[in-house]
Image (spheres, helix red, strand yellow):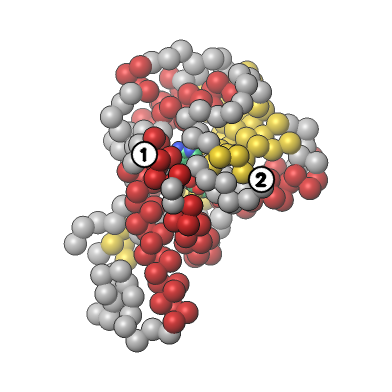
């Protein structure tokens, strides 16, 4: 049994090899299966590496990053709903047009691709820049001034061993009363109360919570004040006791 990207159980068929590739498959199918298995390996890496390790790994492996995002797109097609699409729909509301937005861990920067042509001010950040919209950086250190942003979005991007430094950084770049939007895979959240407690400690107030199709959790917070550095939190060895990585179970 495997624990797939959404934390659901998947049974391997008799004809599957270890990486789920059938020997009788067509070349196209083999290519798709190889992308899927490489995606799963890279996905696991991203969830279990430190942000420094992830940065270092993809610095010399842009091709892997492209494969990762091909696999991620294929994964998205299997979902009943895509969280990034929901966020895009919300941002299209007139009231967001004059806001400064940061899409943190943006992947292909779909939000910017769809909104910049309509005059939106949106920064897109990721470890690798896949197109002209993306600024390459580690989201622990965003190239933004203090209190520059109205809305910070982390859509399925709280990866790496410890997500807490990313929330600190969001606090730094957000204006007071700025919005922090988190979309995560519900099955990753071990205990919602403990997860929410981290945001509370970093001076964010929860004002909306949504569960989408039992798959995704979308949380909206408001920044109340600047966060005081708590070294114990920032230097936590990992945050897997709060937000678990999406891993394949060893058979
Ligand atoms: N938000 C996009 C992409 C989600 S995939 C969407 O919903 O479509 C998660 C992304 O987070 C990946 O592109 C990954 O590279 C990025 N990410 C993970 N750790 C990061 C880090 N430390 N700094 C910057 N980006 C990171």
Residue 232 visible within the image: yes
Q: Residue furthest bottom?
A: 24
Q: Which one is nearer the viewer's eye here, 53 or 246?
A: 53
Q: Relative to 137, does residue 11 appear above or below in the rendering? A: below
Position of the C terminus, as image quadrant, is bottom left
Q: Residue furthest left?
A: 251
| 203 with respect to 51 (left or right) | right
The x and y percentages for residue 159 are 41, 42
| 78 with respect to 98 (left or right) | left
Q: Relative to 33, does residue 211 appear above or below in the rendering? A: above
Instruction: Report the Cα–Cα distance between label 1 and label 2.
Output: 24 Å
Q: Residue at x 49, y 35 (%)?
A: 138
The x and y percentages for residue 112 are 68, 45
Q: Which residue is mark 2?
A: 133
Q: Residues within 10 Å of mark 2 (few under 14, many from 20)?
A: some
- Tag shown at residue 182: none
Q: Which residue is mark 1?
A: 53
Residue 84 visible within the image: no
Q: Residue at x 36, y 30 (%)?
A: 194
Question: In the rendered image, which quarter is residue 6 located in?
Answer: bottom left
Q: Residue at x 53, y 36 (%)?
A: 137
């Amino acid at each position: 049994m495997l624990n797939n990207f959404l934390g659901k159980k998947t049974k391997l068929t008799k004809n599957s090899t270890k990486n789920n590739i059938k020997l009788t498959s067509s070349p196209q199918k083999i290519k798709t299966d190889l992308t899927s298995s490489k995606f799963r390996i890279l996905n696991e890496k991203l969830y279990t590496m430190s942000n420094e390790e992830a940065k270092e790994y993809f610095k010399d492996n842009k091709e892997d990053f492209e494969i990762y995002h091909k696999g991620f797109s294929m994964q998205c097609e299997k979902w009943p709903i895509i969280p990034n699409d929901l966020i895009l729909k919300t941002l299209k509301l007139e009231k967001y047009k004059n806001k400064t937005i940061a899409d943190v861990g943006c992947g292909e920067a779909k939000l910017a691709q769809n909104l910049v042509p309509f005059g939106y001010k949106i920064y897109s950040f990721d470890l690798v820049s896949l197109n002209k919209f993306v600024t390459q950086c580690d989201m622990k250190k965003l190239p933004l001034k203090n209190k520059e942003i109205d809305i910070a979005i982390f859509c399925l991007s709280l990866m790496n061993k410890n997500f807490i430094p990313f929330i600190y950084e969001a606090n730094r770049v957000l204006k007071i009363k700025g919005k922090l939007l988190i979309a995560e895979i519900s099955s990753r959240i071990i205990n919602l109360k403990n997860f929410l407690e981290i945001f509370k400690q970093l001076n964010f107030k929860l004002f909306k919570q949504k569960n989408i199709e039992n798959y995704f959790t979308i949380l909206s917070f408001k920044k109340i004040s600047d966060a005081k550095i708590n070294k114990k939190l920032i230097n936590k060895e990992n945050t897997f006791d709060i937000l678990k990585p999406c891993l394949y179970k060893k058979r």
